[in-house]
Structure formats: C-alpha cells, structure tokens
Image (spheres, rainbow, N blue to C red):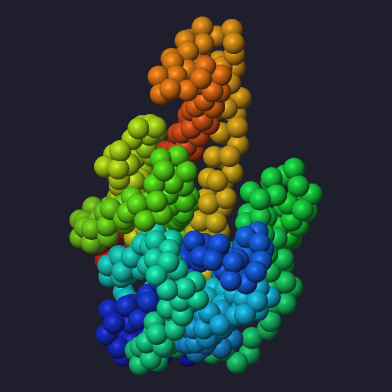
Amino acid sequence: MSEDAQAGRGWKPKGNPWAIAVAVTMAAFMEILDTTIVNVALPHIAGTLSVSYDEATWALTSYLVANSIVLPISAFFGRVLGRKRYFLICIGAFTACSFLCGIATNLTQLVAFRIMQGFFGGGLQPNQQSIILDTFPPEQRGRAFSLTAFATVVAPVLGPALGGWITDSFSWRWVFYINVPVGLVTIFAVMSLVDDPPWQRKQSKLSVDYIGIGLIALTFAAFQIMLDRGEDDDWFSSGFICTFAAVAAVGCATAVGWLLYTAKPVVDLRVLKDRNFALGCGAIALFAMVLYGSAVLVPQLAQQHLGYTATLAGLVLSPGALAVIVLIPVVGYIMPRVQTRFILCLGFLLMGAGLMYSRNVAPDIDFRHLVMMRVAQAAPLGLLFVPASVLAYQTVSQKLAGDAAALFTMFRNVAGSTGISLSTALITSRTQIHMAYLSEHQSPAGASFQQALAQFTQAIRNLGTTLQDAAQGAAGYAYRELIAQAGLLAYMDVFLLFAVLAFIFAPFTLLFSPVKKAGGPGGH
C-alpha cells in the first residue's frame, strides 16, 4: 500500500462537509451561469463596441471553445498543481477575467478576456464534483449532489432571464461585474474550508502528455466552433463548417487512440470501462441535451410565434425551475428507500411523457397552458441529475475519481451545446419542410383554400377597404398563417424526437448496478 493510500485511510475534511459543498457549488454556479447569461446581452455588446451581431457572437463562442478544451484535462492540472491550489487559481482568474470583460473597450479585448475566462472556468465544475466525491461518504453523496443539482439545473434557466434584467436595468458590463463579489466570497470560503486528501495533493514527478493535450484542444475547438457557427453558416452546405467538422472527427479519433495507447495519458479514458460510469455519462448527456435544448426552444416559441415579451418568456420558464427545486429534496429523501436506478428510469419515462404532452402546443395556447407544458418538460429533470451522478460514480475507484469527474462534466457540457445547436437547426429545417408540404394545399385549385381566402377577403372588406387591398391583405394573412403553422409543427417534431430519445434510454437505466443503502453496489 502506498504512503498516500495509508495516509488516506480514514481521512476526513477539517471543515463542515455541507459548508464545503456550498462553497464549491457557488463557484460552479457562477461558471454555469456565465454560459447562458451573456446570450441576451449580445445585441447590446454589438452596439456598444460598434460591431455586427455576428461578430459579437464570438464573445460567446470563444468562451465555450476554451471551456470545452479544459474540461477533460482539468484533472491533470489538479495533479500538477494540487487540487485545492488549482481550484483557487481557477476561481481567482475567472473572477479577474470577468472584471476585465466588463471593462473591455473593443471586441478584440472582450474575446481575449472571454477565452481566458473560459479557460479558467473549465476547471471549476470537475473540481467541484471531485471535491464533493472526496468530502462525503458514499451514503451521503445523494444529498450532496442534490445541492450540486441546484447549480446545474437552475443556472442555465436563470441565466437568460437574469442577463436580460441586468442588461436592461444597468448595462451589459454588469453581466460580468456580478461575478466579482461572488468570486471573492467563494475564494475566502474555499481557502478556509477545503483541504486536499493525501491522494489529491501535488505530484512532484508527473510527465506532461503534450500530444494528448494538443489533440483534445484541436478536437474540442473545432467541434465547438462547428456547433456555434453552424446555424449562421447553413451547416454542411458551408465549406467552413465542413472543414471544422472533418477536423473534429479526425481529431477525436486520433485523440481517443492516443489516450488509450500512451502509458500516462492526460485523461484516463479507461474509466469508461466501468459500466456504471459509462451508462451515467450517457444519462447525463441526454439530461443536458434536453435541459439546454428546451431552455432555448420554449422562450423562442413564446417570443417568435406567440408574441411574448422577453420578460414574459422568462416567466414561462420560472415555474419549471421551481418544480425542479422542489423535487430535488424529495428525490434525496426517496433514494435510500427505493433503488436509485428505478428512480432514474422513472425520470426518463416522465421526461418522455412530458415532451409528448408538449406536442399539444397550438397557435392560441394561453400562458397557463404554456407554463404547464414547461413544467411537464422540466419537472422530470429533478429525478435525473442526482440519481445519474450517484450511479455513475458508485463503482469508480478513488484513483480515477478526478478523471471521472472531468469526463462526466465534459459529457454534460458538450451534450448541452449539442442540444442547443440541434434544437435550433431542426426547428429551421422542419419549418421549411412543413412549409413546402402545407403550401401544396394553398393552390388556386384547392376548394377549401379558396373558401378560406374568400372569407378573409370579405372580413377585411368589411373594414372599409377596396377589393384589391382586401385580396392582398387576405393573401398576406394566409401566408403568415402558413409560417405560423409550419413553425408550430416543427416544434412538435423536435419535442417528439427528444421524447423518443428519453423513452429509448429508459430501459438502459436498469443495467446499472443496484445501490446499497450504504452506497455501494449490491442488493438494495
């Protein structure tokens, strides 16, 4: 047995475990919030810095690229620097870069500071998960992950609404300044409370896998740029997007081959041989895809098709977030009494049912039914995050916990970005397909269409217009109705796709090893 292993037997943190969990979750919440809070401020950023909206989106893309590169290799930096030291560096640098983003005077400065912010922010979520894994014994991890779930589930939903309010009430610069006081408080809390266990302290003799780091950086940079710019550049009809897709595919294959081949990889992919962990990564990926995708779709539906203001669209999301907050403690109470994998299975089944219910969207849907639709989508998420996290880590060895936390967070974030891009792309393509289909029924030979057009024309003529103006107005109204109906059908298609994915994955949850009440795999 190694000296670290001997020293680690019976190790317990000096600080209160729940105070530690709150401190590290504050850091993760701040970072997750920054992935969505900037979105609504982009038009204001473009105006202030005298750039186009398309150019301003690089303030978002640059952050996501840097963030995604660091996520899988954060455990390596923790081993090089010591986990607590690296965590504090990330919080401090993230806070400082937030301030620098706020005082940026041109786009070049803003993008540079956002790259730095994303680079240091990428180390926050995996380290938070790793610290919680070491701080709490297995039987208490469910409740600990319940606290983590507040940051993971609520922050992406809260981000756009909070960002819009800050931007409208103050300035887009305060979207970044708000991180400064939170970051300072978190630094002092982590310094006071968090300790590294013996197996997580700085390792003096550690080789650097430069090839692995380079391949990971290349793969995720290309993939994230492809996702973020795909919708604007019409996806694979663009040579730019095709190039980055090819680079991402080749880079991924090469990176996986290298990381499995080399003796000391920057991140150990062998942890994915653990069945529970591999299934947990799949579960959290689908969870994130629906969470982030629906958080974009519902406000978009409310604003573009139902005429809601940004504030009202944000209010549509709020009850769903509250439902998740209420359900998370309930799940923590139930988990010791019911097999965790059954809860996860129920969560995916309810998610599928909620998404099927969302297909009842109609042009005249009122606010109450729209809120109910969102609650049906969001509430099952409360049954997913904590069980998926507990099941994923239950059989991972202590030695691989850091790599597991980095990969688990990477799967969640990459799937979330994919969900956003997939949702918006499908809405566009399916709307065009439905418009082509519906337009076939709007021909002069169609009796029902001609009858409806005549009714529209007569209704407009009754307002005192000429026959020619009434006919033009009726044709314009019919075209607007065509676009509206095609758009709603597209949303129904995307909700159906997500529902099918949820139903398909539900049986796979039964392949997890059962969790004993004490936290290990076994017969409970």
Q: Residue at x 55, y 9 (%)?
A: 446
Please determine whether, in this image, residue 320 is positioned above or below residue 192: above
Residue 251 appears at what percent x and percent y?
73, 60
**Quadrant where the C terminus is found in the figure:** bottom left
Front one among 118 and 173: 173
Residue 328 appears at what percent x and percent y?
27, 59
Please determine whether, in this image, residue 378 is positioned above or below residue 46: above
Residue 95 appears at what percent x and percent y?
49, 83
Front one among 199 and 223: 223
Q: Residue at x 43, y 22 (%)?
A: 464
Please determine whether, in this image, residue 336 is positioned above or below residue 183: above
Q: Count of labels shown?
A: 0
Locate residue 115 relative to residue 323 in the image: left or right. Answer: right
Q: Residue at x 51, y 20 (%)?
A: 466
Q: Give the image quarter of residue 28.
A: bottom left
Q: Residue at x 42, y 66 (%)?
A: 168
Locate residue 151 relative to residue 454 in the image: left or right. Answer: left
Residue 404, can we see it?
A: no
Front one among 284 and 185: 185
Residue 136, can we see it?
A: yes
